[in-house]
Image (cartoon, grey):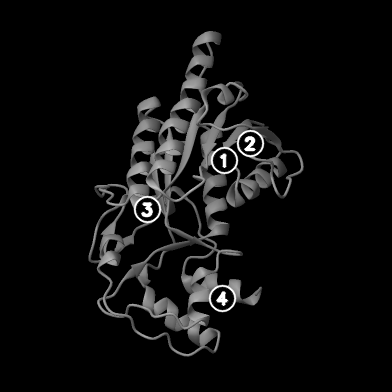
Amino acid sequence: MANILLVGCGTLGRQLAARLIAAEHTVFAIKRSPLKSPVTGLQVVLADITVAEDVKRLPADVDIVVFILSPSERNEAAYQKVYGRGLRHVLSHFRSAALSTSGVMPRCLLVSSTSVYGQENGQWVDEDSPAQASSFNGKALLQAEQQLWAHCANNIVVRFSGIYGPGRVSLLRRVREGKPIQYSPPYYSNRIHEEDCLGVLCFLIGRMLSDKPLKNLYLASDSAPVPLADVALSLSELMSCPRPPAKPEDLTLAKMNKRCRNDRLLRLGYVLRYSSYQKGYGKLLEST
């Protein structure tokens, strides 16, 4: 069994920790504040990775480091602080530990986002598509990816599209409240169910521990990127809500309008639990 460190332990991190512990791994997590919902068996280190002295508290003898970072605020400074300075502190900590003990640096897995893509007009994107982020968060994530690969080219990045699932029901709420939706031109949406996020992470960690071949980048999204209007109309029928009204063309949406391919991940052998929004939202509505 392995020693695994989670850098960041929010909703996704807590669930991942529970699954890894159930698989009999030893799991540590670094977090700025105590967990609101403790995870049995999880060893929590209270520290701020943006503070160099705090990072010295991290265990050095780990096999895999998983970065699931979450800035305290949604602004450029907060993103640069965590994905720039914080990531650099953690990587430096393990580089120094390896040099001082003649040991081996742990492999790293970074949770990133499809916001690194700047394609417009519904173009298809995959791992080979140029990542030219226009948003501050996308730029910060792109810089973090480059920093991770500069540390070790074999480190892994997984770019998740929009995550939904229990507690992540903003679109359901939007449809229920009758908020306007852009119908034309079509604005494509990409999503992945939280269960598949966890499944992908466990799948990749398993392959890392088994030394099975891996690329250093995977795009994780479901197999049905469709116009957001299609999803909203389908949900309105399922929830017996009025058809969402049309909104004027929003030019800001054009900068995030792409369709994500998941072929590389599926070829690797991962099987999506929720391959489409119909399956994912159908299950979600059953439990709400």
**Where is 232 relative to 262, above or below?**
below
Three-letter code for the amino acid on which mark 2 is drawn? Ala
Q: Answer with mark 2 or mark 1, whichever residue precedes in sequence.
A: 1
Considering the numbered disc 4 on the image, is that residue within a helix, a strand or a loop? Answer: helix
Q: Answer with mark 4 or mark 1, whichever residue precedes in sequence.
A: 1
| Residues at discs 2 and 1 in contact (Cβ within 8 Å) | yes
Residue 114, which numbered label? Answer: 3
Q: Answer with mark 3 or mark 4, whichever residue precedes in sequence.
A: 3
| Residues at discs 3 and 4 in contact (Cβ within 8 Å) | no
Side (left or right) of 34 relative to 209: right
Q: Answer with mark 2 or mark 3, whichever residue precedes in sequence.
A: 2
CA separation in Å, label 2 and label 4: 33 Å
Q: Which residue is rendered at x = 54% and y = 73% of the image?
A: 281
Residue identified by numbered label 1: 8
Viewer-side residue, 88 vs 287: 88
Residue 100: % across, % down: 53, 9
Q: Which residue is rendered at x = 40% and y = 26% of the image?
A: 152
Q: Nearer the viewer, mark 4 or mark 1?
A: 1
Q: Nearer the viewer, mark 3 or mark 4?
A: 3
Residue 282, which numbered label? Answer: 4
Q: Answer with mark 3 or mark 1, whichever residue precedes in sequence.
A: 1
Residue 135: % across, % down: 31, 52
| Residues at discs 2 and 4 in contact (Cβ within 8 Å) | no
Q: Which quadrant, please, contains the C terminus? A: bottom right
CA separation in Å, label 2 and label 1: 7 Å
Residue identified by numbered label 2: 29
Considering the numbered disc 2 on the image, is that residue within a helix, a strand or a loop? Answer: strand
Is residue 213 in sight in this rendering? no
Residue 87: % across, % down: 46, 32
**Where is 91 relative to 227, above or below?**
above
Within-10-Å neighbours for mark 3: few <14, some 14–19, many 20+? many
